[in-house]
Amino acid sequence: MEAKQQMHFVLVHGICHGAWCWYKLQPLLEAAGHRVTAFDLSASGIDLKHLDELRTFPDYTLPLFNVMESIPPDEKVVLVGHSLAGLNLAFAMEKYPEKISMAIFLAAMMPDTTHRPSYVLEEYFARTPSGSSSNTQTAPFGRPEDQLVSVLFGPQDLASGLYQRSPPEDLALANTLVRPGSFFMEDLSKRSPFSNDKYGSVKRAFIIAGATEAENDFYRWEIENFEVPIVKEMEAENTDHMAMISNPNTLCQYILDIVGK
């Protein structure tokens, strides 16, 4: 019976993307009888802010905080965060643990409660180096003392690193809609670890969905680094990093299976 109760899913997109990337998953969850909120993080999707207006990772996360503030005290949501959004989830879990029934990390950064928040990103870049053919654009922005760097995935990297098993129409859509983002590494490197009694108290699940085996190995390392009670892995032959685009039906079923446990 529990699995059939209506739940409220809050979908959080990854870097350079927006709420648009959930357009296949959202109606599937709604057809299963659940409520879904998908929104743009700051300076993402159709959000009116420009990246130059942001200084910190919480600045980038502000729209998620606003969603959480709108949740009534007697309601709990299921957070689903993709890619970099695992860190957005962590900030929300630290701030609103009592409003979250579960956090599902989808091919995502998942910090622990021992290291600074930037640790998982540092490990990711060390373990999954970019190829020499990378055409992702980076550029400094904001005040020099903030050491901010923007990132924009190029067409080749979208095709070979994120969308290689997705329909070509979706790759074309991504090339049209991606916007510059930032990892806010300097800001994250100066922050204290997330706490066990807040962030660490929220039930977690992880869905492995990597574009490459090296990426999947990194997710397995994250799961070993910060134990997760529920883990599922997408089929490698028909899933890429953008699991909600390349394999939405299986992803929806996995999410429903997870919340039903």
Image (cartoon, rainbow, N blue to C red):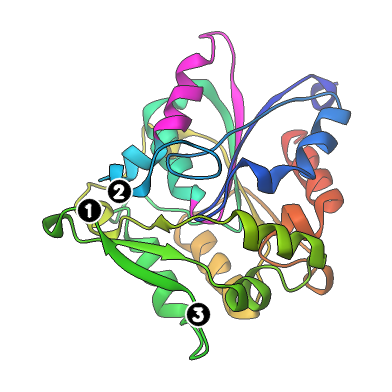
> Which labelled disc corresponds to residue 172?
none
Which residue is denoted by mark 3 in the rendering?
135
Tell me if residue 185 comes above or below residue 90 in the rendering: below
- Whole-angstrom CA distance, mark 1 to mark 2, is 5 Å
Classify 10 Å Cα crowding around label 3: few (below 14), some (14-19), many (20 and above): some
> Which labelled disc corresponds to residue 52?
2
Element class at badge 2: helix
Quadrant in the picture for the N terminus = top right
Quarter of the view holding residue 219: bottom right
| Residue 11, x across and y down, in percent | 62, 38
As shown in the figure, which amino acid type bears the numbered disc 3? Asn
| Residue 89, x across and y down, in percent | 48, 40
Q: Residue at x 54, y 9 (%)?
A: 72
In primary-sequence order, the first of circles 2 and 3 is: 2
Classify 10 Å Cα crowding around label 1: few (below 14), some (14-19), many (20 and above): some
Answer whether residue 34 is magenta in the image: no
Classify 10 Å Cα crowding around label 2: few (below 14), some (14-19), many (20 and above): few
As shown in the figure, which amino acid type bears the numbered disc 1? Gly
Tell me whether circle 1 and circle 2 mark residues in contact (CB < 8 Å). yes
As shown in the figure, which amino acid type bears the numbered disc 2? Asp
Q: In the figure, is residue 253 to the left or right of 164?
A: right
Q: Residue at x 80, y 62 (%)?
A: 169
> Which labelled disc corresponds to residue 142?
1
What's drawn in magenta, residue-wise? 62-84
Q: Residue at x 49, y 37 (%)?
A: 47
